[in-house]
Image (cartoon, rainbow, N blue to C red):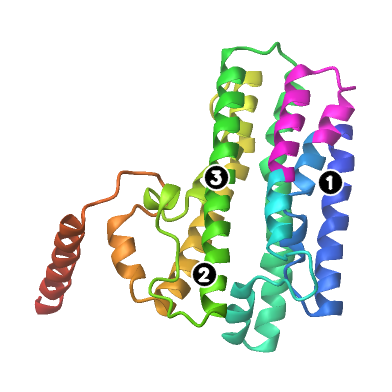
Amino acid sequence: MLPPELLAPVVVCAVTLALCWGLSLVFREYSWVDRIWSVVPPVYVGLLAHAAGWSDPRLVLMTVLTTAWGARLTFNYARKGGYQRGGEDYRWQILRARMTPWQWQAFNFGFIALYQNVLLFLIALPAWTAYRHPTALGPLDIVAAVVFVVLLIGEFVADQQQWTFQQAKRARARAGAVESKGFVDSGLWGWSRHPNFFCEVGQWWMVYLFAVAASGEVLLPTVVGPVLLVLLFHGSTVFTESITAGRYPAYAAYQQRVARVLPWPPRSPAASRTVAADAADVDVNRVSR
């Protein structure tokens, strides 16, 4: 039996899923989930805060923080043209070319529409744990809120650095200049190849930490949301990097020098060459055996 407080979030999830799938069939564009990615999780959290009568300070705080997350992400997606006609994620076009029509439509429904919408519901579900445990705010809530804000700022900085680089890159292309690199590798991107992904995932782990603070339990069923988010971003990172490495030969050296996701001091060029040489030796030894 579905708890009454989850009825509205589940209905919103089901309607959103159906709309994303239906619009993809009508318009032959497949980024509808991307367009609502920053919108529906704060709605789910807010609906649970509303079910509690807006009287639970933890749920109100979670709603404010996730709304700030959604507003920042919506702004960044909008300025890149994501909400415009033809603003489809370029990776879908590449992936679609590798599949037969029926395979792509199965992927469109099963992964893009169904799986991702369910995931967006699940990452907000720690708010349900908070709803079920209306305890007073404590030190762990403060930690979760502060880290969330720090990561929110970090994601804004990373996206701004990416935006500034891409704008300069387009200006160089319009001027007819030869692009020597093609990807940003300075600022936060000099410490992580995907600092925006790190901050994004980290914020939803902080949402889960609110559930831990509310319940007093470390391992909860609602941990499935942030865990699946990590797996999604892992797969997205691998796929995105395979595309970038194919476009820009210099990306291989960047991969050797800079950590993939977790921010870490970059290796020196000499150390990167040593790592690459060691990896090559291992491959040679495997072949020889």
Q: Between marks 2 and 3, how big is the CA–CA gap?
A: 18 Å
Residue 216 visible, this angle = no
Q: Is residue 146 above or below residue 107?
A: above
First in sequence: mark 2 vs mark 1: 1
Q: Is residue 95 above or below residue 262?
A: below
How many labels, in total? 3
Q: Is residue 43 above or below residue 97?
A: above
Q: Which of the two residues, 86 or 173, is positioned nearer the viewer here?
A: 173
In the image: residue 64, left or right of residue 14 = left
Assess whether mark 1 and mark 2 are in contact (beta carbons under 8 angstroms). no
Residue 59: give x, y in percent of width and height.
76, 25
Tell me the residue that label 3 is attached to: 157
Residue depth check, mark 2 versus mark 1: number of the one nearer the observer? 2
What segment is highlighted magenta in the picture? 46-71
Residue in view at x 82 percent, y 34 percent:
46
Tell me the residue that label 1 is attached to: 10
Residue depth check, mark 2 versus mark 3: number of the one nearer the observer? 2
Assess whether mark 3 and mark 2 are in contact (beta carbons under 8 angstroms). no
Residue 57: give x, y in percent of width and height.
76, 17
First in sequence: mark 2 vs mark 3: 3
Dominant secondary structure, magenta: helix
